[in-house]
Image (spheres, rainbow, N blue to C red):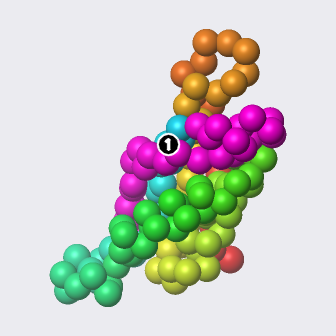
Amino acid sequence: MGVIKLKNIRTFSYHGCLIEEGKIGSDYTVDLKIKTNLQKSATTDHLADTVDYVHLNKIVTEEMAIRSHLLEHVAKRINIRILAEIPLVEKTTVSVSKINPPIGGDVESVTIKMTEIKK
């Protein structure tokens, strides 16, 4: 088993329960960690034998572009899509952070973290 991580994927998205959040948007970061078998690709040195980072990044950016009220909903969509589209992935964990959330205080970010395991 091995781990692939994509750290600090930056997006500008329109998530949130407030109407204003859907209009003005906000900065987000996403961290992704997937578990997969890396032994074959370590031996063959072929991209087809591993999980393509480009595909992972594409899923994250596409799902972050779809407005949701809750970060949990976005994270669940990202995890489910990765497991559905990339057969080599056994487990995926995504953290979605809203930078400078409008919560009436001096808060750098709010983060949710969710994990899904292939059934």
Q: Quadrant of residue 45?
A: bottom left
Q: Quadrant of the N terminus?
A: bottom left
* Residue beneath the point at 65% across and 54% down: 75
The question of residue 7 being in magenta is answered with yes
Badge 1 element: strand
- In front here: 96 or 16? 16
Q: Amino acid at mark 1?
A: Thr
- In front here: 63 or 26? 26
* Residue beneath the point at 52% across and 61% down: 60
Q: Taking 72 as reference, is 47 above or below it?
A: below
Q: Quadrant of residue 119?
A: bottom right
Position of residue 68 measured from the top left corner of the image (x, y, whole percent): 74, 52
The question of residue 34 being in magenta is answered with no
How many numbered badges does the structure rendering display? 1
Q: Taking 71 as reference, is 119 above or below it?
A: below
Q: Residue furthest front?
A: 23
Segment tinted magenta in the rendering? 1-26
Q: Taking 18 as reference, is 30 above or below it?
A: below
Q: Which residue is mark 1?
A: 29
The answer to whether residue 84 is visible is yes
In the rendered structure, the answer to whether residue 48 lies left or right of residue 22 reads left
* Residue beneath the point at 42% across and 73% down: 55
- In front here: 59 or 16? 16
Position of residue 26 measured from the top left corner of the image (x, y, whole percent): 59, 37
Position of residue 12 measured from the top left corner of the image (x, y, whole percent): 53, 45
- In front here: 88 or 99? 99
* Residue beneath the point at 22% across and 76% down: 42
